[in-house]
Image (tube, rainbow, N blue to C red):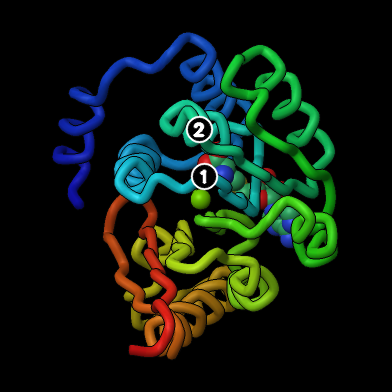
Amino acid sequence: MNEQVIGYIESIVKERPALISEMEQYAVVHNVPIMELVGIEALLGMLRIQQPKVILEIGTAIGYSALRMAGALPEATVVTLERDEERFEAAQGFLSRSEDGKRVVTLFGDALELAEEVGKHGPYDAIFIDAAKGQYLKFFELYSGMLAENGVVYSDNVLFKGLVAEEQVEQKRIRNMVKKLQNYNAWLMNHEEFDTSILPVGDGIAISKKRGEQR
Ligand code: SAH
Ligand code: MG
């Protein structure tokens, strides 16, 4: 989507509560990769339709998307994971200042090592993957089994600034990440138990709907 259109949407998005705006500013100042405004708004739109009651988020950062999800869904609980101590603490600080934050359960540690703890809070109606791009396939394999029937997995950053569509990426580290994401996207699109669509909004969001029992 071109910058002008994104700017236009941003200009008409409803004003956020003061705490949310403060978090958006904190993210800019501290260089925290929270979801882009148009991306989070699209995600919230889908969640308002789906109405999940229990959500798992992989990648809390400072708690921005977790708090926005809790705010958009007054009956939902959000369980969210973060391995970076500084961000985890910032998230706890922000969440403690909000009534909606009481419905957010923060777990500290690497998502690849938290499955047992995460399982205790499930099953999950929605899983939102927004962490290390190179590990998406592992996250999906580890946690999609905790989905409730008709659950949905939302994966952020699957288009990685459009780089997944580039023929050649110069920087090796970036190129590796791009390859992993391309691999994840292809794998996900062909997954037998899920139907997946990719929305070119924000940094690219994949929506993977678990199929019901065999018809
Ligand atoms: N969802 C947040 C942004 C998350 S940024 C929002 O939109 O507000 C991605 C975060 O995932 C980073 O803070 C990073 O530390 C964390 N992360 C990356 N890999 C992880 C892992 N394996 N386990 C736990 N957290 C991880
Ligand atoms: Mg993201």
Q: Residue furthest top?
A: 18
Label placed on residue 75:
2
Asked where in the image residue 188 lies, by quadrant, the reply is bottom left
Regarding mark 1 in the picture, which secondary structure is present there? loop
Residue drawn at 74 percent across, 35 percent down? 87
Residue drawn at 43 percent across, 90 percent down? 192
Query: Would you place residue 59 above or below residue 140 in this image?
Result: above
Q: Nearer the viewer, residue 139 or 26?
A: 139
Query: Would you place residue 125 above or below residue 8 in this image?
Result: below
Q: Which residue is mark 1?
A: 53
79 with respect to 186 (left or right): right
165 with respect to 17 (left or right): left
Amino acid type, callout 1: Lys
Proximity of marks 2 and 1: CB atoms separated by less than 8 Å = yes
Q: Is mark 2 within 8 Å of ligand 1?
A: no
Residue 154 percent location from the top left of the image: 45, 59
Residue drawn at 83 percent across, 56 percent down? 117
Q: Earlier in the sequence, mark 2 or mark 1?
A: 1
Q: CA distance from mark 2 to mark 1?
A: 6 Å
Instruction: Give neighbour class at mark 1: few <14, some 14-19, many 20+ (Cα, 10 Å).
Output: some
Quarter of the picture holding the C terminus:
bottom left
Q: Nearer the viewer, residue 133 or 79?
A: 79
174 with respect to 196 (left or right): right
Instruction: Give neighbour class at mark 2: few <14, some 14-19, many 20+ (Cα, 10 Å).
Output: some
